[in-house]
Amino acid sequence: MISQLADIGKIRIPRKVFEINSTDPTEVHMFSDASKSAYAAVVVVKMKTEDRSKVNLVAAKSRLAPLGKSKSKKMTIPRLELMGCLIGSRLVHSVLDSMTEKDVQVYCWSDSSTALAWIRRQEDWATFVGRRVEEICRLTNKFQWRHVPGLMNPADLPSRGCSTKELWESH
């Protein structure tokens, strides 16, 4: 792990995303994911111009999964996926608040069919699920939520962790 610190200098993340021209269509995409050890969300902005599209990372957040004192107290993967959707909802809401351009398409992506069903159905869920679904639906629209295959989900990297080499090769 310490040997990987030297490779961190290779990774560059642009601080200026781009100038948003109000005539160019802009989309905000949030991806969320979870593993047994962490959950995460990534927000990218996609701007379409006449000749190409430009996509830039604007925000990302990850959290370690809570440690249960026993196997029966460990949080399930579907609940962790829902937690990823929740931090993603908060993150995309924050990004939208900071944007001057308000006419943007928003897409929220998850590879969890269970979390997507909880969000889309808005039934009278048990307390843990119900409270989180309520907040997700307050911050986003349930019709913005879509399924992304796990292998195509950019939030997979921060949810499972990776080496600096993997991070470098992924961009």
Image (cartoon, rainbow, N blue to C red):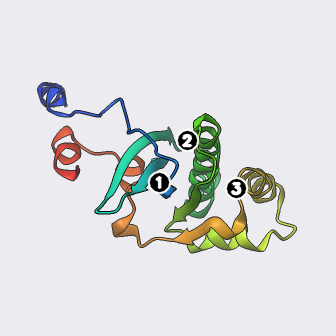
Instruction: Sort mark 1 into few (<14), some (14-19) or many (20+) by Cα contacts within 10 Å.
Output: some
Residue 90 position in % (x across, y down):
64, 43
Q: Reply above or below: 149 against 29.
A: below
Which type of secondary structure does the marked residue at label 2 adopt?
loop
Residues 36 and 124: in front is: 124
Is any atom of residue 39 visible in this view? Answer: no
Which disc is residue 140 wearing? 3
Residues 133 and 47: in front is: 47
Residue 154 position in % (x across, y down):
37, 56
Q: Residue at x 46, y 41 (%)?
A: 60
Residues at marks 3 and 2, CA–CA distance in whole angstroms: 29 Å
Residues at marks 1 and 3, CA–CA distance in whole angstroms: 25 Å
What residue sits right under mark 1 in the picture? 36
Which type of secondary structure does the marked residue at label 1 adopt?
loop
From the viewer's perspective, is the residue at label 1 or at label 3 nearer?
Answer: 3
Amino acid tagged 3:
Thr
Q: Residue lying farthest right?
A: 124
Q: Residue at x 23, y 44 (%)?
A: 167
User: How many numbered marks have been drawn onto this rendered protein structure?
Assistant: 3
Instruction: Sort mark 2 into few (<14), some (14-19) or many (20+) by Cα contacts within 10 Å.
Output: few
Q: Quadrant of residue 146?
A: bottom right
Q: Residue at x 14, y 32 (%)?
A: 10
Amino acid tagged 2:
Leu
Image-based side of 69 in relation to 164, left or right: right
Residue 124 position in % (x across, y down):
87, 67
Q: Reply above or below: 85 against 68.
A: below
Residues 14 and 62: in front is: 14
